[in-house]
């Protein structure tokens, strides 16, 4: 599979989670995924993050997750399809209402943590998420792991599917992220992250943990905002992209 060099990419970050320096990250990204009160966030943090996004001209997305703050939404909860659908709808509505009050609108939805990873392989979960997004606002894009069931479900439903890759997470040869806590799951150095970004964006492939090379579609590039060095990573990744001649634009930007 040949993937042509890109001239632009969206650069997104998970924000409003109460554990990172959002103000220091936002100048470098084009899209933000804002925690909606499930795994993290509340009305005050949502409003503050929305205002920062407006200040920096950053596209706004919802980042709904399992209502499990103790584990930061990073463990799977035993919810059925209807329960997942309601979880997505309620968190979307909460963020959208605050955004409207600020004169802003959402552009996309990206599930968080364990829900995101489960939707990558479980079509029932993916369809539940997509169904709720479509019911809430079919103009919203769906961010999902590149080549996953979530992007396939969005495409099948006629929504805009945005294939996401990661700057500082390790990949297995199946194209899935390595589970946190396993060797290589998180890229610790700027050099590792910049090398992975260069490969993903300019060659359309990632070097997996076993050394194999895997083609991946890259519409948007994610950096996790909860890491302590996220501002430094954001600045370095943006500089590396610009050095490669890549324009950084939100997915719905002209």
Image: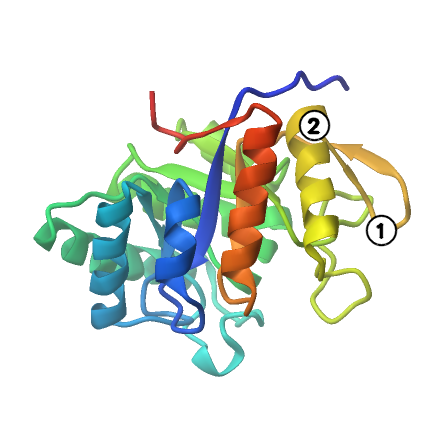
Q: Is residue 168 left or right of residue 206?
A: left
Which labelled disc corresponds to residue 204?
A: 2
Q: Looking at the image, can residue 217 be seen? A: yes
Residue 105, position as x, y percentages in the image: 20, 43
Residue at the (43%, 44%) spot, across then down:
29
Q: Position of residue 67 (x, y in %)?
A: 41, 73
Residue occupying the point 67% across, 16% down? 4
Q: Secondary structure at mark 2?
A: loop
N-terminal-most mark, 2 or 1: 2
Q: Is residue 82 visible?
A: no
- Residue 16: image quadrant is bottom left
Left or right? Give the position of 92 relative to 142: left
Instruction: List the residue tagged with mark 1.
Output: 209
Give the class, few, some or many, for how many residues have Cα within 10 Å of label 2's Cα (few <14, many ≥20).
many
Task: Compute the Cα span from label 2 to label 1.
Answer: 17 Å
Q: Residues within 10 Å of mark 1 (few under 14, many from 20)?
A: some
Whether pointer 2 and pointer 1 mark residues with C-beta atoms closer than 8 Å, the reply is: no
Say which residue appears at 38% left-offset and 51% top-offset. Answer: 26
Counting from the top left corner in percent of width and height, residue 202 is at: 67, 26
Q: Identify which residue is drawn at 25% across, 39% down.
A: 137
Residue projecting furthest to the bottom: 70
Give the quarter of the figure containing the N terminus. top right
Q: Is residue 79 left or right of residue 146?
A: left
């Amino acid at each position: 599979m040949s993937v042509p060099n890109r001239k632009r990419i969206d650069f997104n970050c998970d924000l409003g989670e109460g554990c990172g320096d959002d103000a220091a990250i936002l100048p470098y990204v084009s899209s933000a995924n804002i925690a909606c009160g499930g795994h993290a966030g509340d009305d005050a943090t949502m409003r503050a993050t929305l205002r920062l996004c407006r200040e920096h001209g950053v596209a706004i997305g919802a980042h709904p997750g399992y209502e499990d703050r103790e584990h930061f939404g990073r463990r799977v909860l035993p919810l059925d399809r209807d329960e997942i659908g309601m979880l997505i709808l309620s968190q979307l509505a909460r963020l959208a209402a605050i955004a409207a009050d600020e004169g802003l609108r959402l552009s996309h939805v990206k599930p968080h943590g364990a829900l995101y990873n489960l939707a990558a392989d479980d079509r029932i979960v993916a369809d539940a998420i997509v169904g709720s997004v479509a019911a809430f606002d079919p103009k919203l894009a769906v961010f999902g792991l590149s080549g996953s069931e979530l992007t396939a479900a969005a495409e099948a439903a006629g929504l805009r599917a945005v294939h996401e890759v990661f700057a500082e997470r390790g990949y297995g040869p199946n194209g899935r992220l390595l589970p946190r806590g396993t060797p290589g799951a998180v890229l610790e150095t700027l050099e590792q992250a910049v090398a992975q970004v260069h490969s993903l964006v300019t060659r359309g492939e990632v070097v997996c943990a076993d050394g194999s090379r895997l083609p991946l579609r890259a519409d948007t590039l994610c950096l996790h905002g909860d890491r302590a060095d996220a501002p430094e990573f954001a600045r370095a990744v943006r500089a590396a992209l610009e050095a490669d001649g890549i324009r950084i634009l939100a997915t719905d930007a002209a």
